[in-house]
Image (cartoon, grey):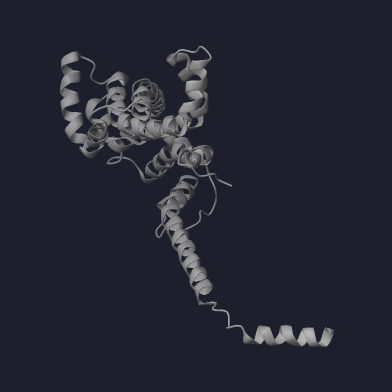
Amino acid sequence: MSDSGTAATASARADLPPIDRAPLRRRRRRAFAVQLACLAITVFMALPLVLIALAAVSSRDDLNRFPKPLLPGEFSTETLSSFFRATGTFPALGNSLLVGLYTVFWSLVVGAPAGYALARYVFRGKDAYRVFVLLVRALPIVVLSVPLATMFLRLRIDDTVLAVTLVHTVLALPTTVLITASIFVAVPADLEEAARVFGCTRWQAARRVVVPLALPGLAASSIFTFVLSWNEILGATIVTLGHRTLPAQVLTALAEASTPYRFAGGFALIIPALLFILVMRRYLVNMWGTTLR
């Protein structure tokens, strides 16, 4: 019985058609191609950052040598220290921090309620409003900066932190509105309605239920706005002269600056963006509905 059963099983397996492994091989090749493309893009984007970082910790002799070595002969803080000792660096750094924090504050104060309205209410012209908000980002910065600079001159607030804050807030509001709208859409409306059933007003339900659930996304939106403000150069250069932000200060000094100053300035400008990616990556991925494992 056992021999006959084994023989029958072997005969049944022999009668089965061969397994087509071509789809599995195609899937593996496709996955390998995607991973290879991601690796190539990562190297392409990370290589300039690595080279700037290596140059920023190189000595002056290595930077002035030709051809420049790929790796520094000795690591030194001379380049960075000379940059931070340069005239105007620390005031410009303070201006950048103030402008970034003020921009985050006003963007959330104005943009978060607008995003909440887009997420919770249905009104005429809602889609047109979304497109109109994006049109602000479609305009070149020069188109916005020149009229704003003229208005600031008339109001006598030119060359101030407030002027740069207003320009950066205008630039950051479209993304803040749309990001916060997507965040509030992800918060179930049933929880807010349940809070109102238990006696909360709409404002109390939003403050006690919606905002705590949307806090990670709001934090990600805030950091995105801060990095946008930190990296913006042209608007800050147009509306300021003596109270410039750090990117504007570095840009205006590039023509007469030495090579070590340029590398150190570039490294100092990319640090906030790197910290943003490292610290807030989980919030950013969760915001779009995916969990980073």
As drawn, is 27 to the left or to the right of 3? Answer: left
Q: Quadrant of residue 42?
A: bottom left
Q: Is residue 69 visible?
A: no
Q: Quadrant of residue 175?
A: top left
Q: Is residue 276 above or below residue 159?
A: below
Question: Residue 288, how many percent across, how many down?
Answer: 45, 41
In depth, the one of 171 and 192 nearer the eye is 192
Residue 272: x %, y % from top left: 45, 36
Looking at the image, which residue is at 50% across and 16% down? 197
Outermost residue on the front side: it is 1
Work out whether residue 199 or residue 23 is closer to the camera in this orientation and state it. Answer: 199
Q: Nearer the viewer, residue 18 or 234?
A: 18
Task: Please provide percent x and percent y for residue 193.
Answer: 47, 22
Badge count = 0
Quadrant of the image occupied by residue 43: bottom left
Q: Position of residue 262 (x, y in %)?
A: 37, 43
Residue drawn where x is 30% and y is 36% of the image:
253
Does the rendering let one see residue 269?
yes
226 or 292, which is in the foreground?
Answer: 292
Q: Residue at x 47, y 30 (%)?
A: 187
Looking at the rendered image, the quarter that the N terminus falls into is bottom right
